[in-house]
Amino acid sequence: MPIEQSALAAIRSELGQVLWDAPLYQGIFNVQLARAPTRVRFGFQTFWPCYARVEVYRMVTGELDLDMEKENLLRVGYELFGSPKVSHNVLITELGQEQRFWYRISVPRKTPDFPDAKGFVRSRGEFFTPRRNTIVTVDRIHVMDDSDTSGEGELTFSLGLYNASDPRERLVEPRISPKQGVSSGDDYNRPFGAGGQSIGRAPDFIGVYVFGVDDDATFWGAPWYGLGIVGMRPPATMPDRTFTESRDYADMTDALHVFATGAKPGRQEGRFDFSSVEGRLHFSVHGRFVTEVVDTLGERITPPWKAFFKTSMAIGTGGKPAGLVGLPAGAIGVALDPEGRLQLGEGGSLDRWRAAEGPAFQALVAKATRAGALVLVGRDGDGVAHVARLLEPHRDMPCWTAIGRTTDGPPALLEDENGTLQVVVRDGRGRPWLVRLDRSARVPDAPVRLHREPVGRPVVGFDAERRVVLAASLADGRLLVLPLDGDGRPGDAELCEGRFAEALAIMADETAVPLLVAIDREEQILIRPLAERGSAFERLGSLEDVLEGLPGEPPRGRPRVAA
């Protein structure tokens, strides 16, 4: 039976709940952005050593999948030198101020554990750059030599402010001081007025250029120069060097200084003091600048691609350190401290934590139930699995129940209408076992072995008759589909022929028809109705195609946990 395209789109989104927790598919976490007016620094971590690539795209429509096209690509940052690493730092420069952008981080999916994996793991998101405003004020010009031996010099100064980087253009209209008699050793105070020159969206570096003239001519002797205003305007682009020149009718000298405007948020102040080249006219310039970096755009209303709450999260001391699990009463943070002790976040935060009693875990899976409870399954250092159910996660502390030895793979969890929790774990040989727990997290029945051969990562779901069904890959590439009866006993198994790498999920489409989703060894996502035993799988697309269509990104931030 063909699957409707609308259902396929919904399934692509639902797959995110599975793909986030598999290190092969999602290897990027703890993404941190340090924004400045014209640049952004990306810091992030990966589960395996690798080289990273960061792309920045122009935001045009506000829709990620529409904007992330080649024509909107602005900047690309690479890690090219040194050895592969798990902590990454990539700087992107030459961005426009007060603009919104998309970013995409890519790392190779190939790892020591998966040497044949192809394609890339990607994390995507958005950011905006702040605005930088700078005011430049020249307080005084000190004249060391006025160039006149018989009296004070008749001095005129002009001021130009430039972008000191390419294209070195003049930022604002120049200012020209009134002609004033100044003797050697004296100051010309506030030559360009009391107020400074304001520059909106100021560049990283500003060049301050002052051109001084001692006018020795009269209008009758040199009409093209004696007016004191002709030729006084600074050039349109910043000069490459300063000069001094003396003629019969004038002595001319200029001075140039470059300063960094600053990029830290908030208000910053600085001073500049510099001198002209030595000539018959010699002076120094003394002034100040005030820079303010502000966020004028603000965060957007949460776009659809970000409206994505996880209902499960896998974490570990050596992998993803923390995560937020979405609950009806509000998200809750779940983390393991460096010793493997459980920490629960307060108020949906990754900054405030409360320590929970219990074993030290190597790995943990947290899952929200439909009733708003939080189920935790952890594996301790001896390989024993423990389970706890928190009916009120924001207030309760876990009471752990040991359910037997397991492998290091994550368990599969499923809750039925009666609140009974089905937990499928694998023993030390990789064989699947079913453990059922009631609402109080007690184990009412003995564990049941579901299959005598080792299986890959198991998934569980309901069929159309609300029976529990397990799916898992086998070592020979076939896919095991195993229904369970009301007592948790295995029924008539179906073995799907093929080259399956892993079962991904059992889920329902828009018509509530249960679907079986898997990935083959060529990284193609395959799907078929669960009830159609023996039917062919339909190809949903490559793993990279499906991941590109997923929203959101892994939760950010390494937790600060109690010692």
Image (cartoon, grey):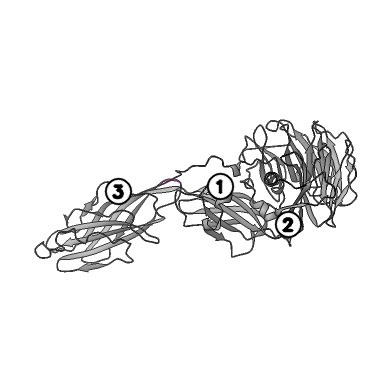
Image disc number at residue 196: 3
Instruction: Tell me the SS state at disc 2.
Output: loop
Q: Which residue is mark 2?
A: 523
* Most foreground residue, 556 or 501: 501
Residue at the image position 19 percent from the left and 53 percent from the top: 178
Is 282 placed above or below 287 here?
Answer: below
Amino acid type of disc 3? Gly
Amino acid type of disc 1? Glu
Q: Magenta residues, as a range? A: 261-269
- Asked if disc 3 and disc 1 are in contact, CB closer than 8 Å, the reply is no
Q: Report x, y in % for residue 549.
A: 64, 50
* Most foreground residue, 191 or 91: 91
Quadrant of image for the C terminus: top right
Mark 1, Cα crowd under 10 Å, few <14 / some 14-19 / many 20+, is few
Distance in Å between CA atoms under marks 3 and 1: 42 Å
Is 430 placed above or below 511 here?
Answer: below
Image disc number at residue 380: none
Image disc number at residue 63: 1
* Most foreground residue, 154 or 420: 420
Residue at the image position 8 percent from the left and 63 percent from the top: 220
Mark 3, Cα crowd under 10 Å, few <14 / some 14-19 / many 20+, is some
Amino acid type of disc 2? Glu
Q: Is residue 265 magenta?
A: yes
The nearer-to-camera label among 3 and 1 is 1
Mark 2, Cα crowd under 10 Å, few <14 / some 14-19 / many 20+, is some
The nearer-to-camera label among 2 and 3 is 2
